């Protein structure tokens, strides 16, 4: 079976985020970009499915501008067989992305689509569930373990009270939590080989989907700074301070 | 305005997050209907009827709704959402799981994890792990929203007397079934709503040594939290994780012990009223947001603190 993995190019998680002074967004010029960490888990899972003989081909897809090719190259270096860039200068909203991915699913016919549970830039946590809904597929979200069992998956999810296991039949969408696996680091020869692997580039507009945003961004602001605190000498002073503040 | 709130519950009791969601609904203003979709959840229905500000409780009872499976909850909500101006639920694991499914079925864009209602169509939500706050205006005919519980003070759990109405469930989604649940048992208060949270990080060193965190929490009547590193290393269960990809908490006092204070961790606790940091590295970023810091070995400080309390 084919497995589709969605990967997004985002500001690296180590970068200190700066809100633009005109309130129009976050500064992404000249900052380190990398693959959304959750998508690395998604790709790793797909690669393990291939190693286990469950998957035959792993296809990485990204929606974004030209530069998202870098992210797809990383995906190819990790081991994806081929890659598709859906070129869009303005990144669509999760609903638009899900619609585009649904089109790719129609064309490619994978049995499993794996997405990160959220992208660390927008933090929406929507796209995987939306894709499942558009395709009318089962969804296994926030996965920390996935065991394939014939044409179903026993999927363990991280919940607010612990863990939950559900059985989802294929075809299905999985969204990953970080504890699903440890993504591999590509080795130099793989990085070299990845340069020769194909990336198909398709214009987002060619799918005939209305991608105009439903949410208008009114403004983007930095959160309020916290008042600077103090260093106390020891536990006794701490307890006194907390009592003075009326907190204990 | 007519608002539909989807209750979060375990068929036995209403989750406190729903009371915060009701507070967000009250800020928008209008009639508030609450949907209780579950199985044998009459206790939840009774609790919901009593919650402040609820006009009506819709009850859908079916075995297929017993375990909160997203496909089945979403199908109920999709069927009725069009009758409302807003549909709200908590930005909890439960809400995050089903709401985008509703949104896609209705061809609408969800607004995730709101922390402020600016007006009936404009909301503020954190992005980039809370390093920026984005104000968005929705043009969809139904606003589909998940609510960050810590940003809205819960409405009163009692005093209301809403009427109930039964709705029939349609057809269960064939492809997904519930297998098992492994709930973390704890005598400590719930992390999401506790007045005091004591969190331990990688600095605590091992699962055995994490008992120092549990002991302090017990002494303070506090909930136990953890950094991702502590959860990944198996010191604490996954539902203790605080941060961008864990829970968001805003207690009166948050103790960060042996936690460096990465932005992803801060995302889950920086709205706490008082932050206390205990860390032996005086350059740890946690000190930049702490109200009170102690630069010392946690294994010296925590026992001293236990004695002082
Ligand atoms: C996509 C993504 C999402 C993430 N989501 C989350 C999240 O939700 N929550 C989260 O917490 N993290 C999250 N992280 C991880 C985050 O980046 C940090 O790696 C993590 O928070 C570090 O945990 P820590 O502070 O316990 O460990 P460390 O950073 O290793 O810090 C340990 C601290 O303990 C101190 N220490 C050690 N020994 C002692 C001692 N004896 N006494 C006193 N102090 C001591 C050290 O000085 C150090 O500051 C995420 C990362 C990514 C990439």
Image (cartoon, rainbow, N blue to C red):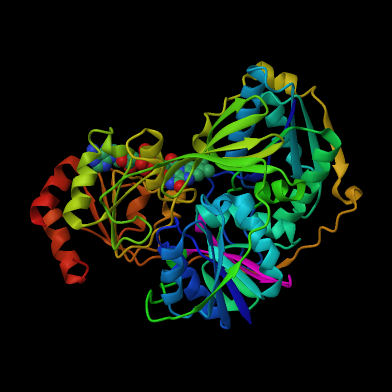
| Quarter of the image where the C terminus of chain A is located | bottom left
- B131 falls in the magenta region: yes
> Along the horizontal axis of the image, is A136 left or right of B77?
right
Q: Is residue A240 above or below residue B187?
A: below
Is residue A125 visible in the rendered structure shown here? no
- A227 falls in the magenta region: no
Residue nearest the observer in this picture, B253 or A52: A52
Q: Looking at the image, which residue is at 47% across and 58% down?
A: B40
Is residue B186 visible in the rendered structure shown here? yes
The quarter holding residue A227 reads: bottom left
Provide the residue span drawn in magenta: B128-148
Ligand 1's image quarter is top left
Q: Position of residue B183 (x, y in %)?
A: 39, 44
The quarter holding residue B156 reads: bottom left
Q: Position of residue A62 (x, y in %)?
A: 74, 41
> Along the horizontal axis of the image, is B186 left or right of B152?
left
């Amino acid at each position: 079976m084919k497995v589709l993995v969605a990967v997004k190019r985002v500001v690296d998680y180590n970068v200190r985020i700066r809100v633009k002074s005109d309130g129009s967004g976050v500064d992404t010029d000249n900052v380190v970009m990398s693959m959304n960490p959750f998508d690395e888990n998604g790709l790793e899972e797909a690669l393990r499915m291939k190693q286990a003989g469950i998957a035959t081909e792993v296809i990485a897809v990204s929606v974004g501008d030209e530069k998202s090719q870098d992210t797809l190259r990383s995906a190819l270096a990790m081991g994806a067989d081929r890659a598709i860039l859906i070129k869009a200068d303005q990144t669509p909203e999760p609903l638009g992305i899900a619609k585009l991915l649904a089109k790719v699913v129609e064309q490619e016919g994978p049995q499993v689509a794996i997405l990160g549970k959220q992208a660390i830039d927008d933090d929406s946590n929507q796209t995987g569930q939306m894709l499942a809904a558009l395709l009318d597929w089962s969804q296994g979200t926030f996965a920390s373990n996935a065991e394939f069992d014939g044409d179903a998956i026993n999927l363990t999810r991280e919940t607010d009270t612990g863990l939950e296991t559900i059985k989802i039949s294929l075809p299905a969408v999985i969204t990953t939590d970080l504890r699903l696996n440890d993504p591999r680091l590509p080795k130099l020869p793989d990085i070299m080989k990845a340069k020769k692997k194909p990336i198909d580039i398709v214009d987002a507009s060619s799918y005939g989907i209305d991608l105009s945003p439903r949410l208008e961004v009114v403004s983007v602001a930095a959160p309020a700074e916290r008042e600077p605190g103090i260093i106390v000498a020891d536990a006794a002073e701490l307890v006194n301070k907390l009592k003075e503040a009326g907190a204990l | 305005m007519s608002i539909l709130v989807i209750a979060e519950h375990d068929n036995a009791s209403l989750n406190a997050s729903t009371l915060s969601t009701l507070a967000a609904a009250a800020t928008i203003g209008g009639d508030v209907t609450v949907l209780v979709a579950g199985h044998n959840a009459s206790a939840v229905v009774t609790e919901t009827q009593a919650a402040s500000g609820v006009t009506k409780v819709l009850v859908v009872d079916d075995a297929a709704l017993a375990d909160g499976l997203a496909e089945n909850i979403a199908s109920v909500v999709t069927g009725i959402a069009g009758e409302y101006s807003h549909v709200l639920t908590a930005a909890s694991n439960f809400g995050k799981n089903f709401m985008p499914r509703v949104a896609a079925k209705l061809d609408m864009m969800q607004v995730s994890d709101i922390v402020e209602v600016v007006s009936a169509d404009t909301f503020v939500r954190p992005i980039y792990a809370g390093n920026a706050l984005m104000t968005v205006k929705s043009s969809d005919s139904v606003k589909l929203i998940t609510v960050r519980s810590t940003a809205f003070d819960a409405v009163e759990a009692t005093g209301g007397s809403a009427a109930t109405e039964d709705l029939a469930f349609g057809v269960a989604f064939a492809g997904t079934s519930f297998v098992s649940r492994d709930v973390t048992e704890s005598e400590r208060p719930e992390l999401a709503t506790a007045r005091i949270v004591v969190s331990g990080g990688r600095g605590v060193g091992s699962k055995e040594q994490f008992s120092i965190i549990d002991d302090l929490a017990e002494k303070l009547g506090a909930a136990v939290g953890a950094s991702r590193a502590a959860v990944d290393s198996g010191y604490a269960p996954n539902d203790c994780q605080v941060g961008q990809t864990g829970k968001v908490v805003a207690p009166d006092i948050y103790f960060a012990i042996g936690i460096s204070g990465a932005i992803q961790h801060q995302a889950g606790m920086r709205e706490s009223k008082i932050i206390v940091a205990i860390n032996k590295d005086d350059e740890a970023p946690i000190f930049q947001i702490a109200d009170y810091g102690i630069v010392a070995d946690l294994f010296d400080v925590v026992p001293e603190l236990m004695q002082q309390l």
